Amino acid sequence: MRKYRFPFFWALLIGLISLLPDEDMPPLNQEDKWAHVVFYAVLTFLLARARSRQLKVQKRVLANFVMAFLIAAIYGAIIEIIQLYFIPGRHGDLMDLLANLIGGVIAFPLHWLLNVKRR
């Protein structure tokens, strides 16, 4: 489980930032979508890397990545739902979720390159 400490703390940071009430957030326009892309690209990469190291199976690069992508996507969807129903002044947004997914996809080439080099 030690291999998951970096993705855990990154996910915790995303959760803390995402669940702040609206009055505590600086005004953002489209920068918000770029932040989603970057934060979820890093989260997906860290999860895929930790999974590869935990299982010691670099040959299953795609399977490790898909699992990491799904975990990050579900996490992002849960945060959007929590924002929609439970955080004052915040709203869940499908475009935010799409930006999360794009970030996750962007993480794949880096994950793949690092695993292919290790072989």
Image: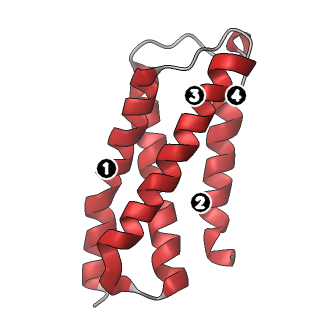
Residue labelled with disc 3:
80
Instruction: Determine whether label 2 and label 3 are within 8 Å by CB.
Output: no
Question: Could you tell me the amino acid type at mark 2?
Answer: Pro
Horizontal and vertical percent position of residue 77 = 53, 36
Q: CA distance from mark 2 to mark 1?
A: 16 Å
Q: Is residue 37 left or right of residue 119?
A: right
Q: Give the mark nearer the N terminus: 3 vs 4.
A: 4
Horizontal and vertical percent position of residue 69 = 42, 55
Q: Quadrant of residue 100?
A: top left
Q: CA distance from mark 3 to mark 4?
A: 9 Å
Q: Is residue 119 left or right of residue 104?
A: left
Residue labelled with disc 2:
7
Residue labelled with disc 4:
19
The disc at residue 34 is none
Q: Identify which residue is drawn at 45% across, 66% down.
A: 48
Judging from the image, what secondary structure is the residue with disc 3 in?
helix
Q: Give the mark nearer the N terminus: 2 vs 1.
A: 2
Above-or-below relation of 17 to 119:
above
- The 10 Å Cα crowd at callout 4, few under 14, some 14 to 19, many 20 or more, is some
Question: Could you tell me the amino acid type at mark 3?
Answer: Glu
Q: Quadrant of residue 78?
A: top right
Q: Give the mark nearer the N terminus: 3 vs 1.
A: 3
Judging from the image, what secondary structure is the residue with disc 1 in?
helix
Q: Identify which residue is drawn at 33% across, 40% down.
A: 102
Question: Could you tell me the amino acid type at mark 1?
Answer: Val
Horizontal and vertical percent position of residue 107 = 34, 55
Q: Give the mark nearer the N terminus: 4 vs 2.
A: 2
Q: Identify which residue is drawn at 43% across, 12% down.
A: 29
Above-or-below relation of 106 to 51:
above
Residue labelled with disc 1:
105
